[in-house]
Image (cartoon, rainbow, N blue to C red):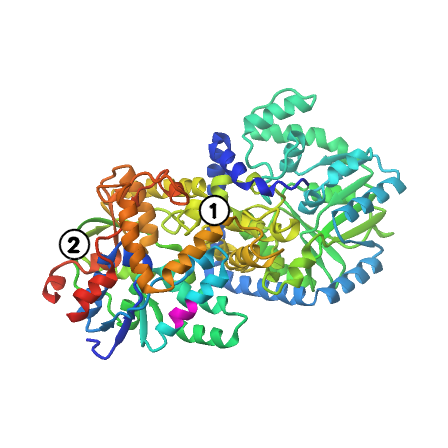
Amino acid sequence: MNEDIKASLFVTCLVDQFYPQVGESVVSVLRRQGVRVDFPIDQTCCGQPAFNSGYHTEAKKIARQVLKLLANSEYVVVPSGSCATMLRVFYPELFEDEPEMAEAARELSRRVYEFSEFVVKVLGVTNVGAEASGRVTYHAACHLLRELGVNREPLELLENVDGIEFAPLRGNVACCGFGGTFAVKMASISEAMLEEKLSEIEDTGADTVVACDMSCLMHIGGALSRRRASARTMHLAELLANGKAAADGR
Amino acid sequence: MDVKTAQFKRNAEAALADEQIQQSLTRAIHHFDEARDIAIREFTPERWEELRERGRTIKDHTVANLDYYLELLSKRVAEAGGVVHFARDAEEVRQIMLRLARSRGIKSAVKSKSMISEEVGLNHALEEAGVEVTETDLGEYIIQLADETPFHIIAPAMHKSKEQVSDLFVEHLDEPREEGITELAGVARRVLRPKFLAADMGISGANFAVAETGTIVLVTNEGNGSLCTSVPRIHVALMGMEKIVPDIEDMAVFLRLLARAATGQRLSTYTTFITGPRRAEDEDGPEEFHLVIVDNGRSRLLRDAALREALRCIRCGACLNICPVYRKVGGHAYGWVYSGPIGAVVTPVMVGLEEAKDLPFASSLCGACRDVCPVKIDIPHLLLKLRHMIVEEKPSKHKNSPLAERLLIHGYYLTVRDRRTFALAHRAGSIALRAFACGGRVRSFPIPPLSGWTRKRDFPALAPKTFHQIWQERLSKE
């Protein structure tokens, strides 16, 4: 067990306001592994919406607060590849012209992990004793895959979930079309990209689409719901929190 | 070439609704993708990575010492008997070309594919001066007949079906209708052959220019490049000033990178090395060789340390092929010569940020382009830098972003800067969304930007309790 590991949860604004059950699942999975989880209460958002849109003034103000908030955390666990990218990759870029802040940002970046990455790389666990049912497919979120280089970890965790049938997504490395403000700024293009992703999902015959980012899942799930499709979306943490071991742990 | 970058969104809508374009994109791009994948697997991904890294290093070194290599190149070209011209912008390129054409009594010119000639609108300028210009790359020839611009960096007529090409040939050429691809290529060959033989001037681009030897390198698959540069009595090559490599040995890196990234070939069918005009002992070749080295906005890229790496680009088109946005809207939507991810980076700098301010936002920042780039240009991060420049830096603060967006971002900042206002927003949002929500989802919302979301996607209702609340009430106590 990992009793000596302390991790701060940076839950992300989307999970906080729309999908708190994802945060609960993360806490449950980590605690079952013995991790001492804390939640720095003053957190809100990482600032990515402002940063991605070009508004560095606002993004910097938010980033400064986050850097302060997480200054003493041993590890920071983020249930989103995209928000973890903001903290780990974009903060140092954002402060390129402020050496002191840039150093603080680089220092933080060494402690930031996306959820699945943390479980596999830091805890060294690929089987969390989860149990579920049904046919599951996995969407590799772009920032997770290409900015953080996390590809294998979520798949390894999925492989060890008892009772599910895994159906890989054809073209599973293509973007779903979310892209933050892109989804509304360039809605038609975003919709066309989503359309392709949906047909790939449909081809797998999966009833559950798993990813490590609620933003992509909000996008994919929003379209599934609009079409009244039977497939549902689920954060990896939710799937991992399921099952016998989960029931024992609660 | 006319700049239509400001109409990106409208152009994109039109392309999305155009069945022919959608079909062509799906067909052609799958082919490119597959070919590239196979080529890299065969080469082995490990060696490919090594080669990319070498390509990147050579280009960065060259760009960092561009003044030195430009001087060396000019010196070597002159020593080989060629004439070097420097052109600051499109107008200067046109003037140089018109002067050459007039002083040498040029009546007709044949052209090998050159993107830079598209940048400067060369064909129209020469035609206005009474020079007949004929494109000899099949794709370029097709779009010249259709009076269109290139749809793709290396496949300019990718968007045309063979039926459309057939129609174009019947309409413009005095030839019987052909339907098959081989037969259509045969028609073009028949029509183009006498043009090659009659032309006074051959115009080409340059995929690379080797400084040490004063050699320009042309890569083609149709052999038209060799004909254009050897039959007419004058050969003029146009090149962007970033096309330089230091030494001939560097070609061993770049020819392998370019062919594989572009078409999945091990080597392009024809690779032509040209050093100066015909020498006394040569059996053929032009009497005069001119090299026009063009800036046209490139020094603005060079000046900007944050964007400079875009000058590594060898115009292979791999980033277009992999880009989920390009795959949906195609090349014309971008409104200028260069399309896709690399177009979204270089176009705003070359034609002006304000004119092309939508392009850096025409990306989901997925980063697939960076993975395939043979010289490892970090395109998504360059797009982010451009977004920042557009919104906050140039030409004047906030000039380029709409007021509504500025207010929205500021409102967002005021909301998230304190967890208490953030919690308040949750309560207010719950009430506001409740009016539109049905069964835990919002099917239609009348106010932008959310209205853009709900056209094809449901929006989730806010959770009854935030994670903050759940943590404080329960989880923190467990």
Q: Where is residue A6 in the image (x, y as percent from the top left)?
A: 26, 76
Position above or below: B331 against B308: above
Indicate yes or no whether the magenta region holds residue B449.
no
Residue B285 visible in the shown view: no
Q: Mark 1 lies on which chain?
A: B
**Label disc, if present, on residue A132 of the rendered structure:** 2
Q: What residue is drawn where x is 82% and y is 35%?
A: B129
How many circles with numbers are drawn on the protein?
A: 2
Looking at the rendered structure, the kind of residue marked 2 is Ala
In the rendered structure, the residue with mark 2 lies on which chain? A
- Please rate how many residues cluster around mark 2, counting C-alpha atoms within 10 Å: few if below 14, some from 14 to 19, many from 20: some
User: To which residue does mark 1 refer?
Assistant: B33
Q: Quadrant of the N terminus of chain A?
A: bottom left
Q: Position of residue B466 (x, y in %)?
A: 24, 58
Q: Residue A202: where, in percent of width, then height?
A: 29, 40
Quadrant for the C terminus of chain A in the image? bottom left
Determine whether, in the image, residue B445 is placed left or right of residue B130: left
Query: Please, what secondary structure does the residue beneath circle 2 have?
Result: strand
Q: Do labels 2 and 1 share a chain?
A: no
Taken as a whole, is the magenta stretch helix, strand or loop? helix
Relative to the observer, which residue lies in front, A118 or B260?
A: A118
The secondary element bearing badge 1 is classed as: helix
Q: Which residue is depicted at the point 36% across and 50% down? A: A172
Left or right? Give the position of A79 relative to B276: left
Residue B428 visible in the shown view:
yes
The residue depicted at 48 percent of the width and 57 percent of the height is B371
Q: Please identify the quarter of the rendering in which residue B168 is found.
A: top right
Q: Is residue A66 magenta?
A: yes
Magenta segment boundaries in residue numbering: A63-67
Task: Determine crowd level at label 1: few under 14, some 14-19, many 20+ residues with C-alpha closer than 10 A.
Answer: some
Which amino acid type corresponds to the residue marked 1 in the rendered image? Answer: Asp
